[in-house]
Image (tube, rainbow, N blue to C red):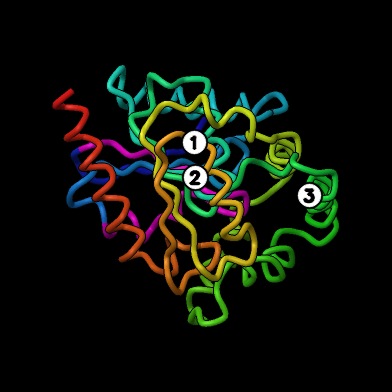
Amino acid sequence: MTHVVEYGTGAAVLMLHGIGGSSDSFAPQFAGLSDSLRVMAWDAPGYARSSDPGREMDLDGYADAAAAVIRDRCGDDGAHVLGMSWGGVIATRLALRHPELVRSLILGSSTVGSGTCKDSADTMRSRVADLAQSGSQDFADRRAPRLLSDNAPGELTHRATAIMAEAVRLPGYRWAAESMAATDHTGDLPKIDVPTLVLCGDSDAVTGIPASQALAGGIPGAVLVTVRGAGHLANQERPDTFNAWTESFVQITERLHNHS
């Protein structure tokens, strides 16, 4: 069972969280966007309130699971897809495998995957042993603060830590990490044929601006926006800016679609 939270009416936006998050990661988007958009967010299979899948998941599996959510809730109309970090990698694969379901892509703090070099892949895979040894709370205590800028308020750090501690567990995190380590979308980006907005915090020390530049440069017609004063969790740290860009991009895309 895949747990999905939904608020609002209007153009549908499915939001896919990062590898250390859950649907709770999008609370600022529920609050800021549900007056004008239909916002949905999942707990990825094996995360938070979603059940553990009966088989190992790879990136195709996560993309197909997201496609199933869209079909179930939106039918053939599809949805705009907003993915943060790992969620953006899933969203990219979703656009490649099921382009008919993706009205637009919004890739926040994301990458082409961690399979670009052995060091990146090994680092991603090493997190699994860390989680297994230390447990979710200690893992979150050490990792979550890195996801925010140095100027982030303590309450935001506390919330990000709590979300991670409640969301991550094995085997789900192992499969998620492996799906990242095994992926390099660089050569596939030119095949993406949906409107794409790439968002990145200017103080993101996890994936960083170059990773977003690689996405925006590889996807035809993609737009890159840097969010000032935000770390990796740009949607949480600067929600007003993040929401404004998201809403305007979705609404513009809808108008263009309706007039085509």
**Mark 3 burial class by Cα count in 10 Å: few <14, some 14-19, many 20+:** some
Q: Where is residue 253? Give x, y as percent.
A: 25, 37
Please check the rendered image and state whether residue 236 is part of the magenta-colored stretch, yes or no: no
The stretch drawn in magenta includes residue 17: yes
Sequence-first tag of 3 and 2: 3
Which residue: 16% across, 35% down?
A: 255
Please give left or right for residue 67 compared with residue 166 in the image. Answer: left
Disc on res. 216: 2
From the top left corner, tell me how far across and down residue 163 is, in percent: 55, 60
Per the rendering, the mark at residue 219 is 1
Label for residue 120?
3
Q: CA distance from mark 3 to mark 2?
A: 20 Å
Q: Measuring 56% from the left and 35% from the top, which residue is drawn there?
A: 90
Q: Is residue 81 visible?
A: no
Q: Residue at x 75, y 34 (%)?
A: 182
Answer few, some or many: residues within 10 Å of disc 1's Cα (few below 14, many 20 plus, some between 14 and 19). many
Q: Is residue 245 left or right of residue 165?
A: left
| Secondary structure of the residue carrying numbered label 1 | loop
- Rendered residue at 16%/27% (across/down): 258
Q: Are marks 1 and 2 in contact (CB under 8 Å)?
A: yes
| Of the image marks 1 and 3, the number of the one nearer the N terminus | 3
For the residue marked with disc 3, what is the amino acid? Ser
Q: Residues within 10 Å of mark 2 (few under 14, many from 20)?
A: many
Label 2: element kind: helix
Q: Residue furthest left?
A: 259
- Compute the Cα span from label 1 to label 3: 22 Å
Quarter of the figure that contains the C terminus: top left
